[in-house]
Every structure is written in structure tokens, then in C-alpha cells.
Image (tube, coloured by chain):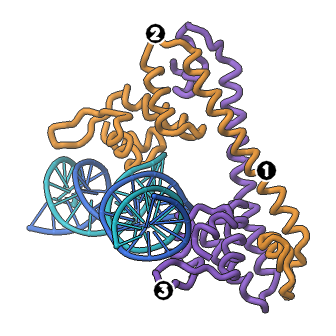
Chain colours: A orange, B purple, C blue, D cyan
Amino acid sequence: MNIGDVAQATGLPAKTIRYYEEIGLVTPHRAANGYRDFSDQDLHNLVFLGRARSLGFTIEECRALLALYADKGRASADVKRIAREHLVQIDAKIAELRAMRATLSDLVDACAGDDRPDCPILRGLAGEGG
Amino acid sequence: MNIGDVAQATGLPAKTIRYYEEIGLVTPHRAANGYRDFSDQDLHNLVFLGRARSLGFTIEECRALLALYADKGRASADVKRIAREHLVQIDAKIAELRAMRATLSDLVDACAGDDRPDCPILRGLAGEGG
DNA sequence: ATAGGGCTTCCAGTCACTGGAAGGTCAAGG
DNA sequence: CCTTGACCTTCCAGTGACTGGAAGCCCTAT
């Protein structure tokens, strides 16, 4: 398969697939004309990568997961540990965003939003000084 | 004030303050020895920037907010619009993370996490293929 | 022969910093 | 006066994960 077909099949941009090759996540063979030639295995790996990335795993986590995916003698505990650590990161991010949201929402609610200059949002950002 | 004092007072790293000068968010004067010399106004702006950044506003949003902060004839509606747009972004991000969290959490719950290779997490990432 | 689409590589840019090297400045201590 | 150490300066490079674009080769159809 050429890169365009793989991009179509996986939903990943061709640019991204080339990037994944560059950093060693996939290693497609080359045809005589220099074109990348992706095997079914490469395709599976790219689908896997796409899903892992869409769940927010970092590239390095993806690399580790892919190695476990390829290792038929793996312990599922190793996979679960990575996933659980990532869950903790997600929860932290959600908590951070909710805190931002709460503060900002209060400020927005307090602001008249008219043509006058008085603005609780700006006062809040300045630290109640003006 | 020297940059170290300002860093102390604002909680921003000196590197970040220099970066903010480079991109034109603050314009401290220079002392005879070449050191940056921050006014109270600069300090206020940096506090403002620190808070706006901590609420997740982008640098360009911060630039716009800072301009409104400086403009005593502003309309609070302009501030409110920026803040509301940012709230929408935050909500989108939270929704995205919650979706990730839900999917990943299900996979983690389904995984035994023992020394055997069978792993619902990997199966899920591969698309139920193995 | 030419037009088009797809493929290749390489370089640069994104965002908001962050780290580090090389060197100037200043106050205190000997 | 000299040194030490903390501070300051600039400049360059790297982060993560791509993304855009230029220049040029390959293949098929007309």
C-alpha cells in the first residue's frame, strides 16, 4: 500500500505517517521507485497509534504500548499500569480546567458586558486593583 | 526593579518575563548598565498576564486583554466576549477529556492487570482485532 | 508531449516557554 | 586591589507532535 491509501484507511494525514516513520513508530519497506510500501502489519500499527493518540497517550506512551502490543508474552499488568497513569494525568487536566472554568465563569457572570469601561473580569485579572 | 525582584513579586520565571518583553507584552526601560528596569506599571501588567495565562488564555488573548486593560475607554462587552469565547474553548477541552476518560476507564476496568498477555486495553486500541 | 496527481526529501513554523553557554556588573570580604 | 558569588545580559537550541510549503521525481492518461 502507498502512503495515500494508508492515510485513507487509518484517517491519519500522510504527513503524520511520515513523521511516525521518522521517529521509528513504523518502519515500512520501500518499493523500487522509492515509495513507502506499507504492510498489513504497518497498517494495524497505525490504526493502533491513531486510537492511542486519540485517547491522549503521548508518543512515548504509544511507543511503549506498541511494544507491548507486539510482545505476545507481555503481562497485561504492564499495559494497565501505563493506562492508569494516563488516567491520572487526564483527571489532573480535567480538574485544572474545571478550576479555570469556575473562576472564569464567575468573572463572566459578574460582567455587565455593555459599552461602559467598568469590568469585573479585568479587575479580577489585575487582582482587584483596577 | 530588576528582573529578579519582578520574578519574585509576580511568581513568573525571569526567562518568561524576558520572553514577554521579546514578544512585546511588556516594555521595561533599561538602566545605564543594560539591566531591565521595571516600573510599577510593568509589574501590574505582569501580574495581570500571570493570572490571565493561569486561566488558560493564549498569549494573543492576553495581548488583547492587556490592551483593553490599558484602555480606560473600553467597553466591557469586548472583554466579556473574549472571556466567553475562551469559556467555550475550555468546555470543549473538558468534554474531549471526559470522553477520553470514559473510554479509557472502561478499558482499564476490563483489564485483569496480571501476568497474562490477554489485554482488553490493547484489544480496544487495535480495534477488537487482538 | 503534456497534464495531473501522488510520491519523495528537506526546511521552517507552530505555541509558550525552558535550558544552557558565554560573558558583563555589582556588592561584600580579605 | 582582587576575588568570589549572585545577579544580569544575549543568543542558540530544544520541547511535543505535528503542519505547511518548496523543489523535484514517478506514473498514468490523453
Foreground residue among B44 and D27: B44
Q: Residue at x 56, y 8 (%)?
A: B115
Tell me the amino acid under the disc marked 2.
Gly
Element under disc 2: loop
Q: Quadrant of the N terminus of chain B?
A: bottom right
Tell me the amino acid under the disc marked 1.
Arg
Q: Please state the chain letter of the residue tagged with numbered disc 1 in the rendered image.
A: A
Give the crowd class for mark 2: few <14, some 14-19, many >=20 residues within 10 Å: few
Instruction: Give the x, y percent position of residue B96.
Output: 68, 46
Foreground residue among A121 and B19: B19
Using the image, tell me which numbered label, if any, was put on residue B120.
none
Using the image, tell me which numbered label, if any, was put on residue A73.
2
Q: Quadrant of residue A101?
A: bottom right
Using the image, tell me which numbered label, if any, was put on residue B32.
3
Of pointers 2 and 1, the one earlier in the residue sequence: 2
Task: Check disc 1 and report the residue beneath it.
Answer: A98
Element under disc 3: loop
Q: Please state the chain letter of the residue tagged with numbered disc 2 in the rendered image.
A: A
Distance (Cα) linking label 2 and label 1: 41 Å
